[in-house]
Image (cartoon, helix red, strand yellow):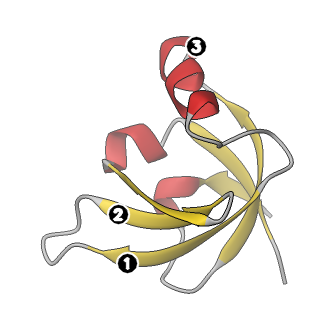
Amino acid sequence: MNTNLSQLKIGQRAVINSFTDKKMALKLLEMGCTPGEVVKLDRIAPLGDPIAITVSGYLLSLRKAEASTVLVSLLA
């Protein structure tokens, strides 16, 4: 199922497919969010923003607006 990174639930894993924002894509690519990379949603702040994901072996914090530009496919 295709969705965006901001819609994952805690513990869900997904594979990065593409990006919807070119400027944000460059920033995320530099941080290890590359197409084909597996990501896992680890934490959500109490008010829902930001979120923390594991990608490329480290924990990365993203705003929901940033995460919504990352298109992913859920893993079983």
| Kind of residue at badge 3 | Lys
Check disc 3 and report the residue beneath it: 22
Left or right: 30 as drawn, with respect to 44: right
Could you tell which of marks 3 and 1 lies nearer the N-terminus?
Answer: 3
Q: What residue is shown at x 55% (from left), y 33% (from top)?
A: 28
**Callout 3: SS:** helix
**Residue 69 % position (x, y):** 52, 35
Marks 2 and 1, how far apart at CA: 6 Å
Could you tell which of marks 2 and 1 lies nearer the N-terminus?
Answer: 1
Marks 2 and 3, how far apart at CA: 21 Å
**Residue 21 % position (x, y):** 54, 20
| Rendered image quadrant of residue 47 | bottom left
| Kind of residue at badge 2 | Ile
Left or right: 38 as drawn, with respect to 60: right
Q: Which disc number belongs to residue 43? A: 1
How packed is label 3: few (under 14 Cα within 10 Å), some, or many (20 or more)? few
74 over 17 or under it: above or below: below
Q: What residue is shown at x 26% (from left), y 58% (from top)?
A: 50
Instruction: Between residue 60 and residue 44, name the one nearer to us.
Output: 60
Check disc 2 and report the residue beneath it: 51
**Callout 1: SS:** strand
Q: What residue is shown at x 80% (from left), y 64% (from top)?
A: 1
**Residue contact at pointers 2 and 1, CB within 8 angstroms:** yes
| Rendered image quadrant of residue 46 | bottom left
| Kind of residue at badge 1 | Arg
63 over 43 or under it: above or below: above
**Residue 70 % position (x, y):** 60, 41
Could you tell which of marks 2 and 3 lies nearer the N-terminus?
Answer: 3
**Residue contact at pointers 2 and 3, CB within 8 angstroms:** no
**Callout 2: SS:** strand
Q: Quadrant of the C terminus?
A: bottom right
